[in-house]
Amino acid sequence: MSATSNDVPSDDQLDAMSRDDKVRLGTNLDGVEIIHREPRFPEPDTRAEKRSEFTVAIWFVLSGLLALAGFGLFIWNRWEFTMPEEDGYWAYTFYTPALGVSFGLAILFFGFGVIQLTKRFIPAEIAVQDRHDGGSNEVDKQTIAAELDDTLDSTTLPRRKMLIGSAAFGLGALAFSGAIAAIGGFIKNPWAEREKAPLWHSGWSPIYNSPADPEETVFLRRDTGNPYQVALVRPEDLDAGGMETVFPWRVSDGYGENEESRHKLLQGLRAARNPVMLIRLRPEDAKRAIKRRGQESFNYGDYFAYTKICSHLGCPTSLYEQQTNRILCPCHQSQFDALEYAKPVFGPAARALAQLPITVNNQGYMVANREFNGGEFIEPVGPAFWERKS
């Protein structure tokens, strides 16, 4: 609905109007018809009103407390990798779930507070408005300002110090904790160890070999369910079209005969960047395999080994589809073609999975091929980062 020239007051008339007059004028000029409007608490300072204010404030306070709890967990809880038999193992185990619960509930409770605020203090109103075109003139500006001021005043929020304080506390704690979590990853220098920085290496790297034998052989080891049992892999252990997850093992890791050896055996299985998918292609599929330039000899016959760490966000690519030779990541549905150097063919992943060079030693066991980068991946595994070139 558009206003006629007779509907528009002069500047003097506009200045003489009260706020309520401007509200009525503004709704009329905007083509708004208020069918029903009723304040939530016609009588101020009743018990019901105070109970409602207290209820809303509780949600905001709980949100703020949970956000601060998340901040405390993020800063002071144990985040370093910890073995089951070491002190602080349970704190490490529940570190990520506790962060998710605290921050998640903080956001959820703040949302509950906003919903309750709307239901308990915003006046119940039913209005119908016609759409209209045109820019905003001085009348529109002053009337909408009056309407907004009237809306704020009718909610009674300006006089509710408890609600304002609790909402500020909850929102401030959320913003502060979220900002700390966002920049927390930039505080620790991942390159402090230079060439031994963990972002560049996995458990297959020669840098973890025994100092007495820098060219130590790294065997492919399977997980039997007992972390202290060493079971090595032979080519005949895997059927054509099969897949098995394997892990690195060195003779210097021992057989669990002492505490240091038990630690190495468990770390070999639990370190996030160690698991590798050992795939034995069917003979007819192996003939069609396309190898990546510079990695033509990384496979051993029909056997190909790819990291299980997805190049998208680091989830485990734990599924192998034999009929299509697809490697699948269940987190975000990225798919990789095992017949074409694990190149991504579907989903958000943009880079191929890193391939581990493998061979068989003179004892018939499958090992990392030391002829290529000492038996390590020739590129970092997992997601991209700034210093990475591929």
Image (cartoon, rainbow, N blue to C red):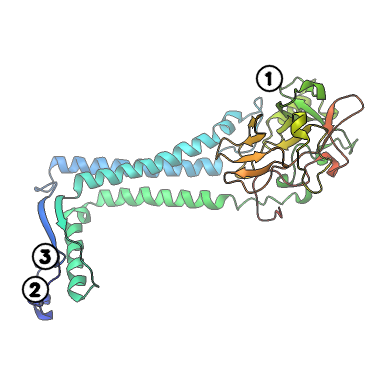
Residue 234 seen in this snapshot: no
Q: Comparing marks 3 and 1, which lies closer to the viewer?
A: 3
Q: In the visual, does 53 lie left or right of 40? A: right
- Real-space Cα separation, disc 2 to disc 1, in angstroms: 83 Å
Q: Secondary structure at mark 3?
A: helix
What residue is at 11 percent from the left and 65 percent from the top?
28
Q: Amino acid at mark 2?
A: Asp
Tell me where residue 141 sits by quadrant: bottom left
Q: Relative to the observer, which residue lies in front, 36 or 280?
A: 280
Which residue is denoted by mark 3 in the rendering?
28
Which residue is denoted by mark 1 in the rendering?
225
- Real-space Cα separation, disc 3 to disc 2, in angstroms: 9 Å
Q: Amino acid at mark 3?
A: Asn
* Residue 18 drawn above or below residue 217: below
Q: Secondary structure at mark 2?
A: loop
Q: Secondary structure at mark 1?
A: loop
Mark 1, other Cα within 10 Å: few <14 / some 14–19 / many ≥20: few
What residue is at 35 percent from the left and 44 percent from the top?
110
Of labels 3 and 2, earlier in sequence is 2
* Residue 200 drawn above or below residue 140: above
What residue is at 43 percent from the left and 44 percent from the top?
67
Q: In the visual, does 182 lie left or right of 238? A: left
Mark 2, other Cα within 10 Å: few <14 / some 14–19 / many ≥20: few
Residue contact at pointers 3 and 2, CB within 8 angstroms: yes
Which residue is denoted by mark 2 in the rendering?
7
Q: Position of residue 12 (x, y in %)?
A: 10, 80
Of labels 2 and 1, earlier in sequence is 2
Q: Position of residue 89 (x, y in %)?
A: 61, 29
